[in-house]
Image: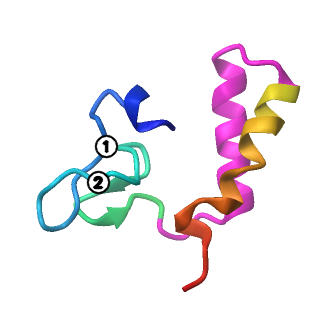
């Protein structure tokens, strides 16, 4: 979710300030809300939500293909 569309403007890091990377649907108090979700599961969840909002399937696939490139899914 783009942070500018997040009704909470992002979620807090463990040290207090808002995260500039993660939205409030995924992250709070410095931790992921679903720490064990896989990238494939996240893609399916996001596709499902987008379809609930009326996005066509091809757009859902187009936008969710970028999820594996997000910082959360990168290996250190």
Residue 59 is labelled as: none
Residue 17's quadrant in the figure? Answer: bottom left
Q: Which residue is mark 2?
A: 19
Cα distance in 3D space between marks 1 and 2: 6 Å
Residue found at the far left of this picture: 16
Q: Main secondary structure of the magenta part?
A: helix
Question: For the residue labelled by badge 2, is the local secondary structure a helix, a strand or a loop?
Answer: loop
Give the extent of the magenta segment. Answer: 35-57
Query: What residue appears at the point 54 percent right and 70 percent down from the top-left corner?
Result: 36
Observer-nearest residue: 30 or 62? 62
Q: Left or right: 53 with respect to 25?
A: right
The answer to whether residue 24 is above or below residue 28 is: above
Q: Left or right: 8 with respect to 56?
A: left
Q: Is residue 44 magenta?
A: yes
Residue found at the far top of this picture: 54
Residue 10 is labelled as: 1
Label 1–label 2 contact, CB within 8 A: yes
Measuring from the top left, give residue 37's x and y in whole percent: 59, 64
């Amino acid at each position: 979710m783009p942070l500018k569309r997040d009704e909470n403007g992002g979620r807090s890091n463990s040290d207090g300030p808002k995260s500039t990377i993660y939205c409030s649907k995924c992250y709070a108090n410095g931790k992921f809300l679903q720490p064990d979700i896989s990238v494939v599961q996240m893609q399916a969840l996001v596709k499902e939500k987008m379809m609930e909002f009326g996005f066509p399937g091809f757009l859902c696939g187009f936008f969710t293909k970028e999820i594996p490139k997000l910082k959360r899914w990168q290996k250190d």
